[in-house]
Image: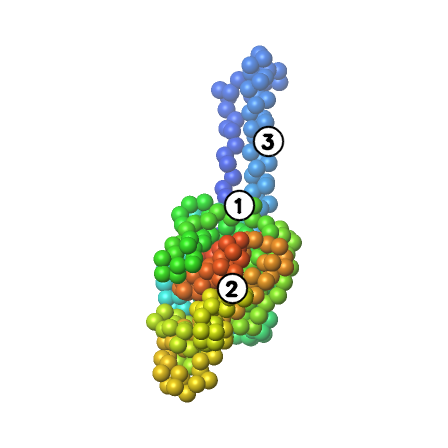
Amino acid sequence: MAFNQRDDDIVDGEDETPSKLPRCNKEMPGYFSNEPQNEAAESAGRATSERRTSNSTAWHRRDSFKKTRPPFPWFGMDIGGTLVKLVYFEPKDITAEEEQEEVENLRSIRHYLTSNTAYGTTGIRDVHLEMKDLSLCGRTGNLHFIRFPTHDLPVFMQMGRNKHFSSLHTTLCATGGGAYKFESDFRTMADLELHKLDELDCLVRGVLYIDSVITSGPSECYYFENPSDLDHCAQKPYTLENDYPLLLVNIGSGVSILAVYSENNYKRVTGTSLGGGTFLGLCCLLTGCSTFEEALEMASQGESTHVDKLVRDIYGGDYERFGLPGWTVASSFGSMMFKDKRESVSKEDLARATLVTITNNIGSITRMCALNENIERVVFVGNFLRVNILSMKLLAYAMDYWSNGQLKALFLRHEGYFGAVGALLGLLHPS
């Protein structure tokens, strides 16, 4: 990742020029006389005075709002165990005065982030997720979504130092385990102080905010119709009306499952260490791959039944007593205890079996949590689901099959960015 480019363009700053007050003019009846000339003049004078008072009040409110608003640039960061997620708000309602006052460092940072879609070999701006013309804290602009591996964080901090980020006197709000782990590195390498925010608070806040502000374009929430047919199930939009309660399953390096009853009332029900990090780590060991995308590509071409031991391998068919179909996995990787099976299996089969194992485990735990909490709406988020249609279809099928159609698996387009969005909101609304 190479955050080292320097460009000059674009602008930020404070906005809002106050509305013009009514002009005092001799042609306005009664404006300069002690006594109104008639009832109409008195009424006109009173209305004008009220307009002046109203405009003045609005002016002072906007001025007060500007004073409480943090300076640009506006960032939110979620530093996870595998990926760093960064959201950046690019204001588009810049005045000519702001353009003249904008400092070089701010212009350079903004131009660099918004004029590139890739940063070095590993940093990516997810252009398809960009939110345009978003109104945020009294400004209008675009919200950008950027990600890069956590092991490249030192390069990001060096970029911040090179572009004199600390001179802008802004607060960098961050969440995730890395906000604690790398706090001293930000201080020593980039001369930046992190404002650390609770990871689960940011996650819930980000999910609810993004869902509430999307009013056009692709729906934020969706599900898969006919999940029992993995080859033909179709993605359909879904409206999250009457949001609560919902079970929020965040699949990152590990998994956290939250029961959300309102914006400020939620609890962590449970979690599992077997998540996206497990999938990638095992695939690297078993197949020699090195990236998440490579592991998913292998999995899409493999067949997990060559690796797993199924119910039919044990019973010769269905396990009728418990209603288990013969194709149900009885033992993940169970066939690998046999030498001939090990010798015939492909790397693609191993990647597919790893993906199915991790996904089935998450689905099983989620279903039990939903039953225990008596919640019928389940929302899956997290970067494990990025470009991972296969796992989403498996989760949709698992929820539908094992609950007899009572549980619907829901997914969100912005997948793993909600923690970073929550951190940005924490910057703009500290309370």
**Is any atom of residue 152 visible in this view?**
no
Residue 150, x across and y down, in percent:
48, 72
Image point (56%, 45%), residue name: 242
Q: Give the foreground label among 2 and 3.
A: 2
Up/down of 53 relative to 165, above or below: above
Label 1 secondary element: loop
Mark 2 vs mark 1: which is more N-terminal?
Answer: 1
- The amino acid marked with disc number 3 is Thr
Label 2 secondary element: loop
Q: Where is residue 51, by image quadrant?
A: top right
Front one among 376 and 141: 376
Q: Which mark is residue 323?
A: 2
Q: Give the foreground label among 3 and 1.
A: 1
Residue underneath mark 1: 241
Front one among 410 and 110: 410
Front one among 183 and 364: 364
Residue underneath mark 3: 53
Disc 2 vs disc 1: Cβ atoms closer than 8 Å?
no
Residue 360, x across and y down, in percent:
50, 68
Residue 124, x across and y down, in percent:
40, 66
Disc 2/disc 1 C-alpha distance (Å): 35 Å
